[in-house]
Amino acid sequence: MRSDTAFVIMLAASLAACSQASEEAPPAEAGGAATPMVPFNAGENVSPFAIGSLHAAALKDAVFSPANDNRTLATNQSKADVDALLTAEGLATDVLELSVQPLIVRTADRVLLFDTGNGPSGMLSASMATAGVEAGAVTDIFISHSHGDHVGGLVGANGGLAFPNAAIHISANEWAAMQANAQLASLVTTVTTRVATFEPGAELTPGVRAVDIQGHTPGHSGYLITSGQASLLYIGDTMHHSVISVQRPDWTIAFDGNAPLAQESRKALLSSSAASGQRVYAVHFPFPGLGRFENRAGTFVWVAE
């Protein structure tokens, strides 16, 4: 298992490399040849924002409300411990609300979708329609990992590709795990011809680099999106709850395949991001999941935009 220090060094180096590349590259609009980018429409379930010169939007897909019974989050703690933490933040103690919001980004020549939500049972299609983007316009999909609330939307209600023109970027380790999972056999068959695998740290499209964040699944990946001096780190399922996962990163999450490694990764990402002021996109935090981590007297907190 990696040490926490080693992970911080690796993550910091990855972010620094992306930042240096973005500083050296001219802004997209500087050449004058780029196609004007149309911003996304706003709505109740669509929250547009910018990443440098890029248009982006949070797209709500669903909200989960698991019981606060130590079976989902904080499985190594007592309910009293969790209740005390939630109460201090003014949150209810009966259920734990977890949002699901894929991210969409428009560049000069691409439409990028980060994770695809639950599929037909979710509201991603409706949110995309509100935002003003058609499924056929998506050119690239970046999958953080293969859990159903992230890959379910790859396949439409008719069993075919939901995004027929998109390359599906997924880490080689995660793709291997998907192929070995009998429950995903139908999905794997449908998407195989569109899948493009990558190794940790790879630059996948201009301005998008994979970030290796281990522990949740065999090939779990975050993504660093850069535009000029601006950047956004998409953290996938590194964290699930904006209070529990952030303020108590050692509390075990039932969804993590390798819980000790996932806890190590959480602490390292929190430390690195808080130190650098990195802007973060958290797919399961309260909608729209956009903000930063801060270290306040030794405790990390989520500061939403």
Image (cartoon, rainbow, N blue to C red):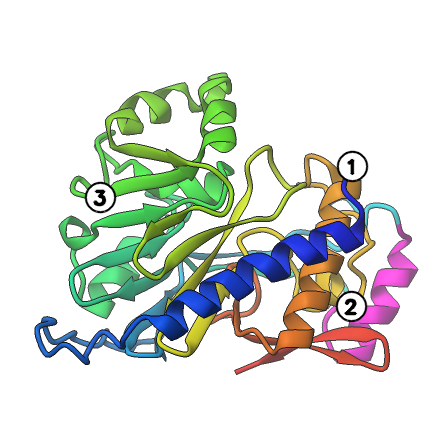
> For the residue marked with disc 1, what is the amino acid?
Met
User: Which residue is drawn at the image coordinates 20% and 62% (left, top)?
Assistant: 129
> For the residue marked with disc 3, what is the amino acid?
Ala
> For the residue marked with disc 2, what is the amino acid?
Gln
User: Which residue is drawn at the image coordinates 64% and 53% (left, top)?
Assistant: 10
Mark number, residue 247: 2
Q: Are marks 3 and 2 in contact (CB under 8 Å)?
A: no
User: Which residue is drawn at the image coordinates 35% and 21% (left, top)?
Assistant: 186
Mark number, residue 1: 1
Element marked by disc 1: loop
Q: Quadrant of residue 156?
A: top left
Is the stretch drawn in magenta largely helix, strand or loop?
helix
Element marked by disc 2: helix
**Dot placed on the residue nearer the N-terminal end, 3 or 1:** 1
Question: Where is residue 218 shown, x and y percent of the image?
Answer: 59, 32
Q: Which residues are magenta?
A: 77-92
Does the magenta-highlighted stretch encompass residue 197? no
Q: Are marks 2 and 1 in contact (CB under 8 Å)?
A: no
